[in-house]
Amino acid sequence: MTKKQRLELLKTKRGKFQPGPKNCLTDVRGVRVGHLTLDQDFQDESGRKIAIRTGLTAVIPCDMKEEIRLQAGFFDFRSHNEITGYEVEDDFCYLNSPLILSNSHNIGRAYNAILTYGFSIRRVEIWPPVVMGIDDSWLNDMDKSSIDEKQIVKLLHDSSGSQVEEGSLGIGLGLRAFGWKGGIGTCSRIFSWGEKEFTLGVLAASNHGNKPESQMKNPMEKPSAAQTQGSLILILATDIPLVPFQIRRITSSLVVGLPPINTLKNCLDSVTCFLFSTANAMSLKNDGPLVFDFSLVDDSALEILIRAGAEATREAILRSLLLSSPVQGRLGRKANSIPDQEFQKILNQFQDTA
């Protein structure tokens, strides 16, 4: 099948909820996304061949020139990824900054770049920057793949609310999933309560479900931790009014409800699910009011949101596989696009749990 035919097949398995106009994270009003991709080959001082297959993916949750905080939270399952701002998000449940997905060695530069970006737009509160690290060292020479802070600041300024590109770009360039080329996938769902229409968007970075290279050759050989630890990162945005305990309930439900192939194929993989709501924004203008007014959906309505989120999450992961191009990188390793037969097998396993 061609890529177009496989996308059409995926549409038939979509579920009961309709996608948004662009079927991506930026269907949520005010959300912007950008990618920075580094694809380079050179020799270091010793003559060793270096393959840089990495990048950054940034999510701007709202107009950062407005002094507002958003309600946010996450659920971390078997986590071994570096996540800056973890304690603040866990304790106070608000989001002040862009989110950046980076390889582990560029986390510090991305953190500093978010602060520089905030200062450049004269934002008073930009702390704590949220950067999530991903190990892309199977394809990428991580120790040589430094990204300049100015490039990251430009990425944050240039991120847009248009159609989000998917596949092998941004942080997705060096990722691998289920033994095939992984990457970035995104989609959205819209639904109504009464006369109001709401949107939920998902962006997935799939780098999980891989067998260690040593076990591919010898199933009895014990692999190193670095070979075994993959990760799946899910970023969700919605315009539904939510409060922190509801966000925690949704994110944990989405992770627990993932098809088992995402969590059991490699039991050392981690899953991070981060959700923010653009509703209930807290104004910090003039230090903000002493009392904030909130709206929220009734808990009984969360089931619909969780079901829509589960549909969107599954599709985003599948799209990250479907739309990723082959990449050859470090040590001559190659991650190929998933063949039709293998894609059909994974699609069936995703559908069995729908």
Image (tube, rainbow, N blue to C red):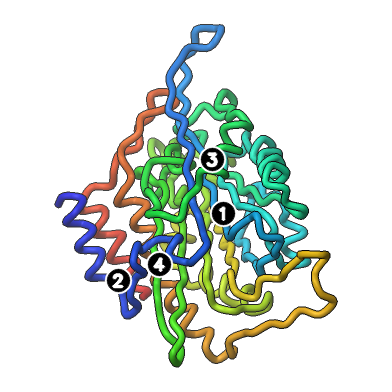
Q: Amino acid at mark 3?
A: Leu
Q: Earlier in the sequence, mark 3 or mark 1?
A: 1
| SS type, badge 2 | loop
x and y, in percent, of residue 206 in the image: 45, 51
User: Vertically, is 252 above or below 322?
Assistant: below
Residue under the image location 43 percent in, 65 percent down: 27
Q: What residue sits right under mark 1 in the picture?
A: 60
x and y, in percent, of residue 318 in the image: 34, 58
- Seen from the viewer's position, the closer of residues 37 and 354 is 37
Q: Earlier in the sequence, mark 4 or mark 2?
A: 2
- Residue 155 circle label: 3
Between disc 3 and disc 4, the foreground one is 3
Q: Residues within 10 Å of mark 1 (few under 14, many from 20)?
A: many
Between the C-alphas of marks 2 and 1, the distance is: 27 Å
Residue under the image location 45 percent in, 37 percent down: 174
Between the C-alphas of marks 3 and 4, the distance is: 23 Å
User: Vertically, is 107 above or below 41?
Assistant: below
Between the C-alphas of marks 3 and 1, the distance is: 10 Å
